[in-house]
Image (tube, rainbow, N blue to C red):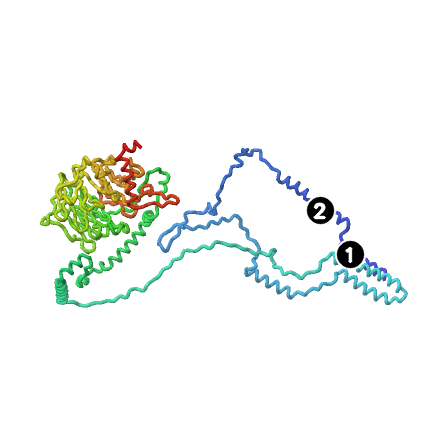
Amino acid sequence: MPAKAADKRRQGVSGPSRGRPSKAGKAGSKKRDEDASPEAGDALGDLARALVKSPDQLELTEAELKQEITRTLTADNPQAPQNIVRFSFKEREYKLVDYLDQTAIHFSLNGNLIPKDSDEGRRQSIRSNIEAEEAPVETPAETSEQAEIKDEEQTGDTEAAGEGEGGEEEEAAEEVAEAAEAAEAAEAAEAEEPPPKAPEKKLPNQFNFIERASTTPFNPLREKGCQTEPIPSLNFSATIHQWDIYDAYVEELQRMEKAKEKEKSKPQAVKKEEEKRGLRKLSHVEVQHVDPITRVAKAAKIAERMVNLNTFDDIAQDFKYFEDASDEFRAQQGTLLPLWNFQYEKTKKLAVTAISWNPKYKDLFAVGYGSYDFMKQGHGMVLLYTLKNPSFPEYIFSSDSGVMCLDFNSEHPHLIAVGFYDGNVAIYNLRKETSQPSYKSSAESGKHSGPVWQNELVHMDVIKLSGEGTMQGPEGLQLQTLGCGTSFDFHKKIDYLFLVGTEEGKIYKCSKSYSSQFLDVFEAHHMAVDTISWNPFHLKVFISCSSDWTVKIWDHTIKTPMFVYDLSCAVGDVAWSPYSSTVFAAVTIDGKAHVFDLNINKHEALCTQLVVTRKKNKTTHIQFNPVFPIIIVGDERGLITSLKLSPNLRKMPKEKKGQEVKKGPEVEMAKLEKLLSLVREPEAKAET
């Protein structure tokens, strides 16, 4: 029995020693590490980097290889549909969808991974925790082989004690040898197996899966609305007799008579003062008879302007911000950008005969309508438009005779003087809520027998030019010319000096100090002088245009023109610009507008553009806005067209480093004087 037990012990001890790595195994692993050295890795990398060329590969030159080809990658899906239409409940119509999902899915796979934060992941985690708590905890004990050896040792000790004391010496020697072998086996087991760890809590799925993602928030469109309570209404009914209506009329008549008596009892001086200052208030009777529509007229006008501002928003944006960038690529040429069109239904068969900007409100202008055809004379109209409301005029005045001219008063911008074809002159007051003029001449007051071609409202005096060849004004001023007068203009600084153009083409320089004589005569044109205008900056320069196709610039101290421009068509009107002494514009009857700048080009126009597109239509008048860079042009069909000047047509002096740009009337006057000096003294220029 002891021999068999010893053999079993030897077999149990020798079991763990078999797992110990031998010297031959260590040598083999060392050899494998040497084979996997960096030199062997480099050789494999060189083989991997070897170029494999296709036999039909394109051969490129060195320059083509160095050429960089840029490709722009966008996040948009090229296969996304662009014509998806959905019904909009707000606008009650089908609308094109602007926002499309640009996500393109290249690969999709349904897996068995469960996120930790999901409900299923939490349930599995709780279930595994419960199972781990219920299982018995195993303590780190000896291995099965060690336990078997221990049992055998205990059994052998029991058997040996029964045999007697005869084999005690042999047993002692065997026990020492077994103890040594057991110690070696324990050391080998400790070196081979790591200390056991606490069991890790694992989920049933294969991986510990966590998914993280981020996306840009998309703000959906929202609609907000509010609903007010309805206005309370009241039903009223009564029975009236004819005598009740009669009594109401009698009471109203008595009120009106009392109001008239109060008006008569006022001193005459107080009445004149109220009329002069425009502070006369409506009487009690007038307030009682105001139409309900009139009470909300101001609010309705503001609402109308706001609606038109939204309707013509693109034009308003161009008027405020648009600048023609193509001017940078043109040497000197410019363009005119069409803006608003102003037209009234009742003036489509009338010609635009006069245009004038209001001196106070820079967006308000007046237009006179009549006819230049003497065989087709009829009614006339005066309309006042504003740039804030191009769809409908602000004021409307009708007349039995055609309007030939009009002008605002500079000191009282609410007064406007109008000259008619029948020789009458009328003054309208915009503050009064009436379509009738405050004053109108008659045969008794000495009206003209011919058309009033032009008038000016200077201070509070009306100076008018008649087709009879006479000019009438205050204090008995009456000038008889040798021909039919067609145009005149007062000097901007010298108030007594003015010019008169005639149908024969002559220009008369006159003075209010001499009522029966003129100062000088210019043989200006071969046909009627349509327009004369003093330069707003230079005291000696004026411009004239005629039906003989020419525009001429004059110095009133010299009888010959300084500049002459042939526009190849009859010229209807000409006007100086308010911002530069060298810029002016003209219109011809072929429907074109011409803009000149003498400081840039003294020989030809910077811009010649067709304004009227219809056939058998002529442009008649042109005017610059005093503040904004726009012009308005009228034609024979009653249409007013507004156009914006491009940057090349309104060039200002450039700023230099360290120097301030000089501005003002003196600078503009010096600029034009420099140009005129080149024309006045050509011999002196050649000598220098």
Could you give the CA–CA distance between mark 1 and mark 2, rounded to whole angstroms? 30 Å
Q: Which amino acid type is marked by label 2?
A: Asp
Above or below for 607 versus 243: above
Outermost right residue: 166
Secondary structure under tag 1 reads: helix
Q: Is residue 78 visible?
A: yes
Mark 2: few/some/many CA within 10 Å (<14, 14-19, 20+): few
Q: Is residue 349 visible?
A: no
Q: Are marks 1 and 2 in contact (CB under 8 Å)?
A: no
Secondary structure under tag 2 reads: helix
Q: Which-is-in-front pick, marks 1 and 2?
A: 2
Q: Position of residue 195 (x, y in %)?
A: 71, 60
Image quadrant containing the N terminus: bottom right
Q: Foreground: 682 or 599?
A: 682
Above or below for 614 versus 183: above
Q: Foreground: 47 or 581?
A: 581
Query: Residue at (32%, 63%) from the top-left corner?
Result: 228
Query: Residue at (26%, 51%) from the top-left corner?
Result: 361
Q: Foreground: 428 or 291?
A: 428
Q: Which mark is residue 33?
A: 2
Q: Position of residue 587 (x, y in %)?
A: 25, 40
Which image quadrant for residue 257? bottom left
Image quadrant containing the C terminus: top left
Q: Which mark is residue 15?
A: 1
Q: Foreground: 94 or 543?
A: 543
Q: Which amino acid type is marked by label 1?
A: Gly
Q: Position of residue 84 (x, y in %)?
A: 41, 49
Q: Position of residue 23 (x, y in %)?
A: 77, 50
Q: Is residue 506 left or right of residue 581?
A: left
